[in-house]
Image: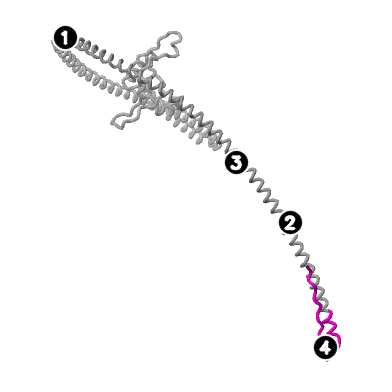
Amino acid sequence: MTETESIAPRRQGLCEFPGVTCANPKQADPGAPGRPPKYCGREGAGVDGKPVVHNKANAWAAKNRLARQPVRRDGDAVGSAVPAGPGPVTAARMTLEQLMKGSLPRLVEELEGHLAQIAEAVRTYGDAEAVAAEVEQLQAASRAELADLERQRGEEEHRRRKAEQLAAEAEDAREEADEAAQEAVAALESARVDLAVAEEAAEQARREAAAVRESAADELEQARQEIAAAHEASATEIERIRAEAEQRIRDVQAVADDQLRQARTEAEAARLAQAAAEAERQTAQQTSDQLRTELREERNRHRAELEALRTEHRTDREQLRADHQSQLADLRKAAEDRFTALTTAQHAAEQVAETLRHQLQTATAAPHPTNPKPQEPATPTPAT
């Protein structure tokens, strides 16, 4: 793979503006008939370093500029000029024809001669091993020569493809130049039409401007006359307005004097009313002070009465508490006495019950008399 073939995949999809390496992508294919776009349509560096738009017309101009530039060769270092040879396509075709017509048949004939000599030597000497070794050697040499021929043919094929590619690029450049020329012609025709329209519009504008100037002059003269008449009318109107304003000022002055006198009278009445109000306020203040004093005395009296009532209530409460304590003591003593009496009665009842139980046991154990006299139980004396 050559250097051109290795770089081509990396440049796929990018702008192919000649003479520069543009990193912008190609324009999107609009789907219209014809070749797909090969340039980005953006502004970038040109072959001379100046910014240009990467389109078909500028690409065609750049290719022509590159074609007109001299090609530097190895012998240019010493300043010697090398005469131009045939083009790459012609050179590749001539080399291929020379190899196909001259070298290849000659080499095939030489190979056939060698093989015939080998066969003759085999038949002559009859040594199979030597013959086989020599044949193997010759076959190896033949294979090497054939490989060399294949390599040369591959190189020639590569040169031919490169020449075809250059021819295709030249065809593309020609088509792009034709398209650019057509676009330039169309643009020129459009510019001519636009220029004619612009000239006609300019002429119409000049005629309209002249008419407008004439009309403006007439209107200006009429406006001046109207301004003069308006000035006279405004002077008369201003004089009338000034007289009316002076009369209104005099009327307003008279009304203001009347209102001032009335305001002074009202102010005097207000001052008298204020003095009367001040006297009433002082009287009300004195009355308020007297009422405040009476209220304070009444409050003190009520407070003393309340304190006396509280003292009396406290005394009554203490007396009631003492009476209650005395009643509780009496009730407690009566309850204790009653409890003592009940306890004594209980003991007496227990003694009587014990006596009756003993008598019953005695009567049960002794023989029964014929007419026994019942004994009267001892009546317990109740405790007082």
Q: Quadrant of residue 250?
A: top left
Q: Are marks 3 and 2 in contact (CB under 8 Å)?
A: no
Residue 198 place in picture, x, y as percent: 20, 16
Q: CA distance from mark 3 to mark 2?
A: 34 Å
Q: Mark 2 or 1 closer to N-term?
A: 1
Q: CA distance from mark 2 to mark 1?
A: 127 Å
Amino acid at dot 4: Pro
Q: Quadrant of residue 127?
A: top right
- The residue segment tinted magenta is 358-384
Query: For this rendering, which residue is in front, 106 or 207?
Result: 207
Q: Mark 4 or 1 closer to N-term?
A: 1
Q: CA distance from mark 4 to mark 2?
A: 55 Å
Residue farthest to the right, as pictured: 366
Q: Mark 1 or 3 closer to N-term?
A: 1
What is the crowding at mark 1: few (fewer than 14 residues within 10 Å), some, or many (at least 20)?
A: few
Q: Is residue 376 magenta?
A: yes
Amino acid at dot 1: Thr
Q: Is residue 363 magenta?
A: yes
Q: Are marks 1 and 3 in contact (CB under 8 Å)?
A: no
Residue 329 numbered tag:
2
SS at circle 4: loop
Q: CA distance from mark 1 to mark 3?
A: 97 Å
SS at circle 3: helix
Query: For this rendering, which residue is in front, 279 or 153?
Result: 279
Amino acid at dot 3: Leu
Label 4: which residue? 372
Residue 9 place in picture, x, y as percent: 43, 29
Residue 236 numbered tag:
1
Residue 306 numbered tag:
3
